Image (cartoon, rainbow, N blue to C red):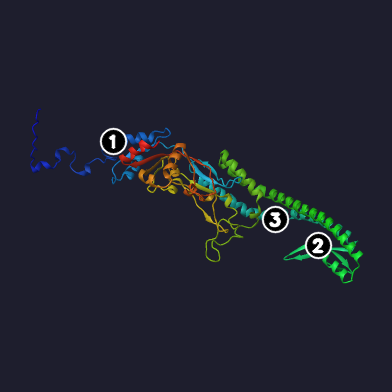
Amino acid sequence: MTIKPTLKPTELPAAKLRWRCELSRIPFETTAQAELREGFIGQERALRALKMGAELSAPGYNVFVCGLAGTSRGGTIARMVEELHPPTKESLDRCYVNNFKLTDRPRLLALPRGEANAFKKDMQGGIDFLRRRIPQVFEGEPFQRQKGRIVERFTVREKELMDDFTRRIAREQFALGHMQVGAVALPEIFPVLEGQMVPIEDISKMVHEGKLESPVAEDIERKYEQFRQEFTVVYRKTLTLSRELASELSYLEQEAASVLVDGVIEELKEKYAGQSIAEYLEEVRHHLLDNLDPFKEREGEGEHDEETPDGLPKAQGGPERDPFRVYGVNVILAHSDGDKSPVIFETTPTYANLFGTIQRAYDTRGGWTSDFMDLRGGSLLRADGGFLIMYSLEALSEVGVWRALKRTLNHNRLEIQPLEMFYPFGGSAQKPEAIDINVKVILIGDRSLYELLYEYEE
């Protein structure tokens, strides 16, 4: 066996233990003459890999960045991605509106970039216009004249029915009056004895007191039952007339308001193209014409303070809720006119921060309620068409985040729901329409975490 000689350490003088830059290697005399170099020095390979990952548009491809903690990885990667300036992916503005057919399933509208806030403003402007003009139409002389003719026609028909019945029972010594039952006065038929209307309950009492003979009382009671049956028929006819009157008045109101409503809707349809918006605006048109009562009050009338007399916030889910809220537009994603892809660095990747949530309001019945205006988007939605950067360990540590993130990226569809929906007796009754998104996620972590995810995650 050959024994290798032991190497002796080389002794170095103290002067050689520190590197010194020779001045001859510096191509300028002062730093003022130095050329400014932008970018990340010594990261060419990392930049090439990041550029490839950022520009790879195939589905299912995301990026995992390894690095040592404490090296400002998040901010550095965000600046790297912004400097790469990858081409902007197609991304639309998103807003939720009321679904008039299924109120618990808010409708999603997608508009070209920069148009969502304008659509919201125009919708609000249209409703404000109708709130000012519809009361003026209903209070105007032409409308009141037509309404008066209709009411008079039905009043005459109802009076003829009642007068005919009153004359028939008067010939048999009966009269039509009213009986007080609590706070309500109900129509009733009374026998007339010696010029006085007598309640039918008093007839048997008068027989016992000897004031009325039994055969006469029996005849009165028999006629009373007959007239009660006839009056039931007459009363039903008056109810039918009342329904017909309400129907004709409703039709008159719709005809009078339709000119204004049609003008607002058609103007919006011309400005904002698209089948989904056209369908929504048609639903708005029908709902407006079928629910004109809130528009009969002039704007500002009937409004209440934001607090109850005891100082508590006014309940938002009860009868006092703004009747015009159903025509609102909830913009959850609005883009600027810039052409750069969004780069979102989420430092707190909780479920609500990533996927959004549904806020709830206290109602007058002691419970909680929500509607389409309570939907809120998260950073995944804000990163639509761009990049979402976050630390992998924090995402894995948050309840419900990892599974929901994988599901969202696999299907490219985002569902806004509160985290409570995953637990019994929790969650929201709202089931908003899912949003198609296109996001590339950049996770940051160490090598060991990457190996674990690579080994055990699909």
Q: What residue did someone put label 1 on?
A: 44
For disc 2, the neighbor class at 10 Å (few under 14, some 14 to 19, many from 20) is some
Q: CA distance from mark 2 to mark 1?
A: 97 Å
In front: mark 1 or mark 3?
1
For disc 3, the neighbor class at 10 Å (few under 14, some 14 to 19, many from 20) is few
Q: What residue did someone put label 2 on?
A: 188
Q: Nearer the viewer, residue 318 or 2?
A: 2
Q: CA distance from mark 1 to mark 3?
A: 76 Å
Q: Quadrant of the C terminus?
A: top left
Q: Residue at x 55, y 64 (%)?
A: 308
Question: Which labelled disc corresponds to residue 14?
Answer: none
Q: CA distance from mark 2 to mark 3?
A: 39 Å
| Badge 2 or badge 3: first in the primary sequence | 3
Question: Amino acid type of disc 2?
Answer: Glu
* SS state under label 1: helix
Q: What residue did someone put label 3 on?
A: 140
Q: Is residue 396 above or below residue 169?
A: above
Q: Does residue 336 appear in this view?
A: no
Figure quadrant of residue 207:
bottom right
Q: At which x and y percent is residue 367?
A: 55, 56
Q: At which x and y percent is residue 187?
A: 79, 61
For disc 1, the neighbor class at 10 Å (few under 14, some 14 to 19, many from 20) is few
* SS state under label 2: strand
Q: At which x and y percent is residue 193?
A: 88, 68
Q: Nearer the viewer, residue 23 or 254?
A: 254
Q: Nearer the viewer, residue 367 or 441?
A: 367
Q: At which x and y percent is residue 212?
A: 90, 69
Q: Does residue 186 appear in this view?
A: yes
Question: Amino acid type of disc 1?
Answer: Glu
Residue lying at the far top of the rendered structure: 1
* SS state under label 3: loop
